[in-house]
Image: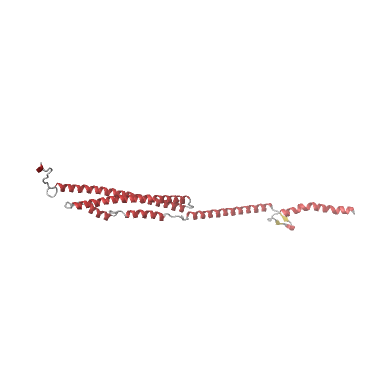
Amino acid sequence: MPRLARMTSAPALALALVAPLVLSPVFATPAHAFFGGFGRIVYDPTNHAENLLTAARTLEQINNQIAQLQNEAQMLINQARNLASLPYSSLQQLQQNVQRTQQLLAQAQNIAFDVQNIDQMFQQDYGNLSLTATDQQLIADARSRWENTVGGLQDAMRIQAGVVGNIDSNRAEMSTLVGQSQNAVGALQATQAGNQLLALQSQQLSDLIAVMSANGRAEALIEAERATAAEQGRIQRERFLTPGSGYQPGNAQMFNNGNN
């Protein structure tokens, strides 16, 4: 009986020792193993390697597609930024500055900045003086020319004051536009900020032209008055020296000879 027990226990012990070795491939076999004959699971290393390579290639393609989609999304974001419009406009303020200067030019006294008006006033006050005009008429004409000259100087000073008044608003606009340009999120905003800076420069050039025009007008009136005054002096001197119509000589008694 003990001998039979030893004989039956030996195969059991061998089975117990072999079982882990037989069952271990079952738990370690991947999903790509296939069933062989007699219902046993057979592990194919070559097929497993090919499957792993295919999975790696598939994962690489997916990663490439994801990267491509990310690049396209970033491209669209950049395009949207480049097409974004500048949220600030200085046009209204610049137009107000130009309009203020134009109003000062339009208020020019006596001889305005108008070709027809200039021709008419010069023909009236600075044209050929009449030799037959009375002294009262010559004096009135001289006073009118003096008023034109003084008015031109006053207009020039008023325009200069208006342009100086625009400096502060122009400084504020320039600071704002430079900030908008530096903070631009795209090419369109930067371009629009640059265009508005050019518009600001144009407005400043308009103010400069207005000042130069007013100063030139005042100087022209001074020269015209000076030339006309010289002509008027010549006429009065000629009238004074012409016998019969100018100075009439007569007897003058300086001392009372009868009381000597």
Tell me if residue 213 can be seen. Answer: no
- What number of labels is visible? 0
Q: Position of residue 208 (x, y in %)?
A: 35, 49
Q: Nearer the viewer, residue 202 or 4?
A: 202
Answer with the quarter of the image where residue 41 lies.
bottom right
Q: Nearer the viewer, residue 77 or 150?
A: 150
Tell me the residue at 20%/49% (across/down): 232
Tell me if residue 105 can be seen. Answer: yes
Residue situated furthest front in the rendering: 259
Residue situated furthest right in the rendering: 1
Residue situated furthest bottom in the rendering: 39
Residue 175 shown left or right of residue 37 in the figure: left
Q: Nearer the viewer, residue 89 or 215?
A: 215
Tell me the residue at 49%/54% (across/down): 81
Identify the coloring: secondary structure
Residue situated furthest left in the rendering: 258
Q: Position of residue 128 (x, y in %)?
A: 20, 51
Q: Nearer the viewer, residue 155 or 50?
A: 155
Tell me the residue at 63%/54% (across/down): 55
Classify the position of the C terminus by image quarter. Answer: top left
Classify the position of the N terminus by image quarter. Answer: bottom right
Residue 31 shown left or right of residue 95 in the figure: right
Q: Position of residue 124 (x, y in %)?
A: 23, 54
Residue 225 shown left or right of residue 259 in the figure: right
